[in-house]
Image (cartoon, rainbow, N blue to C red):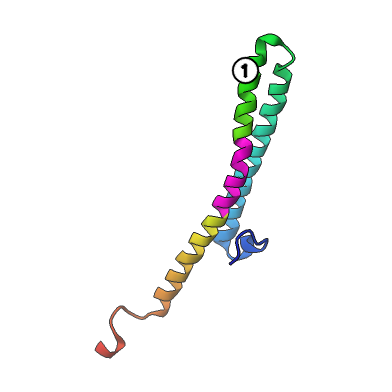
Amino acid sequence: MALFHPDNHTLSEQHKRIYAYCELAYTTVDFSAAALFVIGSILFFREATTYLGTWLFLIGSILFGLRPTIKLFRELAYIRLRKYQEVRDESENNTGWLNPDMR
């Protein structure tokens, strides 16, 4: 499984669920960051609110930095899920933990 492959989210129902949660988080962060930048820009029109506007720009910048973090988290979750599924598949194929010669 290649990182950031466009078909990764369709591998299983769990992959689809991870994708949906991460897309929701990504969109929420994206919208929040954009809103903070717009509000911060408006606050820069008055000298008295420039300080607050600066803080909103900073928070918005941090949120924009979260965007690639969410995508990386999603891809790492896919890898963890794949490893879990491989272990589960191996245990289902194995009929027991004893050596077959010892049964």
Q: Position of residue 66 (x, y in %)?
A: 59, 41
Question: Please, which residue is most extreme toward the top here?
Answer: 48
Instruction: Report the side of 62 relative to 47 (left or right).
Output: left
| 50 within the magenta span | no
Task: Please identify the dominant SS of the magenta region.
Answer: helix
The magenta region covers 63-74
Question: Please, which residue is most extreme toward the left here?
Answer: 102
Question: Please, which residue is most extreme toward the bottom here?
Answer: 101
In the depicted view, which residue is nearer to us: 23 or 34?
Answer: 34
| 71 within the magenta span | yes
Q: Kindly identify the residue that appears in the image at 57 percent across and 60 percent down.
A: 15
Instruction: Report the side of 24 relative to 102 (left or right).
Output: right
Q: Which residue is mark 1?
A: 52
Q: Kindly identify the residue that appears in the image at 57 percent across and 53 percent down.
A: 74
Q: Kindly identify the residue that appears in the image at 66 percent across and 27 percent down.
A: 36
Q: Position of residue 103 (x, y in %)?
A: 26, 88
**Is 100 placed above or below 41 here?**
below
In the depicted view, which residue is nearer to us: 39 or 62?
Answer: 62
* Image quarter hosting the N terminus: bottom right
Q: Position of residue 55 (x, y in %)?
A: 60, 22
Q: Please tell me how crowded label 1 is: few (under 14), some (14-19), or many (20+) other residues with Cα within 10 Å.
A: some
In the depicted view, which residue is nearer to us: 46 or 29?
Answer: 46
**Is 35 placed above or below 5 here?**
above
Asked which quadrant contains residue 33, the reply is top right
**Is 48 placed above or below 17 here?**
above
Q: Position of residue 80 (x, y in %)?
A: 48, 60
Asked which quadrant contains residue 47, the reply is top right
Asked which quadrant contains residue 89, the reply is bottom left
Q: Amino acid at mark 1?
A: Leu
Q: Secondary structure at mark 1?
A: helix
